[in-house]
Image (cartoon, rainbow, N blue to C red):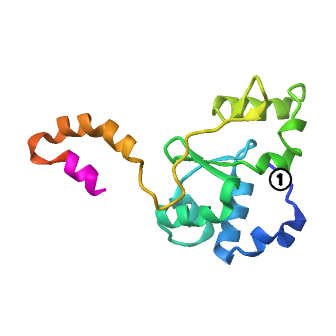
Amino acid sequence: MAKRYIETKIWDKAWFRKLGVETKALWLYLITKCDHAGIIDFDHDSFNFHLRVSYSEEVYLELFKHFEDRVVLYEDGTKIWVKTFINYQYGGIETLNPNVRPQKAVIDRLINQRLLDPDTMSFTQVETKPLSDASKPIETLEAYKPELEKRFGKSVDVGYEIEKM
């Protein structure tokens, strides 16, 4: 059974005090259920089961906004990385030692997930699922335009639909 450190002064931190009960429970779930590198699958059914709620994926995305940059969604929103987990458990990325087997496993996991640059030993910028209400940028939609036109043919005016979005 894995054991985790938790900062007892978390209750004194303004960002945590401002959270609602459900969001606090979600945060505690994330930091205790994630793997040794702070990574967890975004499985809202599992979250619902363990937290005894029935929220949609969209509700969780709204709740994640309260965590600001502490949580990163990546791989098209299928994985969550609790970025600050490394600080809680290991004292920060700069203290991880590749000569210590458990810490090397953390380093390797972060590198394999493309969350850590092995050359600089710094966190990378991963493509994340937006945590705001903004939809995909128009450039992304325009990039899909040829594929959509091929798929729908003349039955849908793809350009018009993109413009509406």
- Measured as percent of width and height from the top left, residue 113 is found at 63, 34
> Mainly helix, strand or loop, the magenta region?
helix
For label 1, the residue is: 4
Look at 50% across and 69% down and name the residue there: 55
Residue lying furthest top: 119
Location of the C terminus (image quadrant): bottom left
Identify whether 131 is placed above or below 17.
above
Total tally of numbered discs in the picture: 1
Q: Position of residue 46 (x, y in %)?
A: 56, 59
In which quadrant of the rendered view does residue 6 lie?
A: bottom right
Query: Where is 80 relative to 142, above or below?
Result: below
**Which span of residues is magenta-colored?**
159-165
Q: Amino acid at mark 1?
A: Arg
Of all residues shown, which one is farthest toward the left?
154
Residue in view at x 39 percent, y 41 percent:
140
Q: In the image shown, does 45 or 124 lie closer to the viewer?
A: 124
Q: Secondary structure at mark 1?
A: loop
